[in-house]
Image (cartoon, helix red, strand yellow):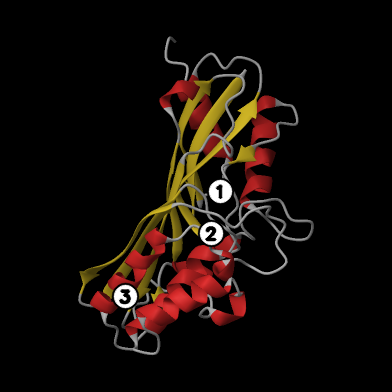
Amino acid sequence: MRYFIEFSYHGKAYHGWQRQPNAVSVQEVLEKAMRLLLRAETPVTGAGRTDAGVHARVMAAHFDTAEIPDLTEFQYRLNRLLPGDIAITGLYHVNEDAHARFDAVSRSYEYHLVQEKDPFLRDLAYEYRAPLDVDRMNKAAALLLEYEDFECFSRSKTDVKTYFCKISQAEWKRISPERLVFHISADRFLRNMVRAIVGTLLEVGQGKLDEEGLRRIIDSKNRSEAGASVPAHGLFLTDVSYPNRIRITNE
């Protein structure tokens, strides 16, 4: 039977979601706990990849196993096996062909900036002290919704077949005098895309780049034309959405 799990993690200790040959990943730790609990190798397929140091408030994955009689008990026992920086928040039965990556219809991220030194946010927000014009940044961010090809924000030497993404939200919000959060949602994201977009919008906020300059960068399809990628520790995956049809509810 196929199950979906929803979980969150603090990314500082991990080299991203996906298994790596010489570094610890969230996937590796989760699969190890699943193996101990189910007493069998149990591959877990995630909704996508997050880079080293990136956090997830909401991540989803699927796995196959024999019927789990008590999902609440299974979730409790799995959480007991996992370290404190990974938490299972949901578990449910899905259709046999449901896929955590390919059935996702949208994904959302937040990028957190703090504009003063804050020891409690040092692993969760990028300290960036330069004055920023948030209105200019939001006008530029709105332009992203007019485009679909974002090759200029993609990591070089990637294996993707298309650079097309449909962005449905891109907006900065100031949540306090010292804190800014960038919200972005799309049907899919390229590797490094959000961090490159944020770095480019920060140039807009400092007056180094205008809206027409941003259009030229997007049209160039050249990563070297866009701004530098911001650090990973300010980035959070906050939502992965699926159609209701994949979930089995008659249990």
Where does label 1 land, which residue? 83
Q: Residue at x 60, y 22 (%)?
A: 2
Near-viewer residue (30 or 223): 223
Badge 2, how many Cα within 10 Å: few under 14, some, many 20+?
many
Residue picked out by circle 3:
137
Residue 68 appears in the rendering? yes
Q: Is residue 230 visible?
A: no
| Residue occupied by mark 2 | 11
Residue type at the position of mark 2: Gly
Query: Label 1 sits on what residue type?
Result: Pro
Question: Which marked residue is nearer to the observer: mark 1 or mark 3?
Answer: 3
Query: Residue 148's spot in the image, x, y percent?
Result: 49, 57
Between 119 and 221, the one nearer to me in the picture: 221
Q: Nearer the viewer, residue 157 or 148?
A: 148
**Residue 64: percent from the left, percent from the top?**
65, 24
Which residue is rendered at x = 29% and y = 71% of the image? 139
Percent x, y of residue 150: 53, 63
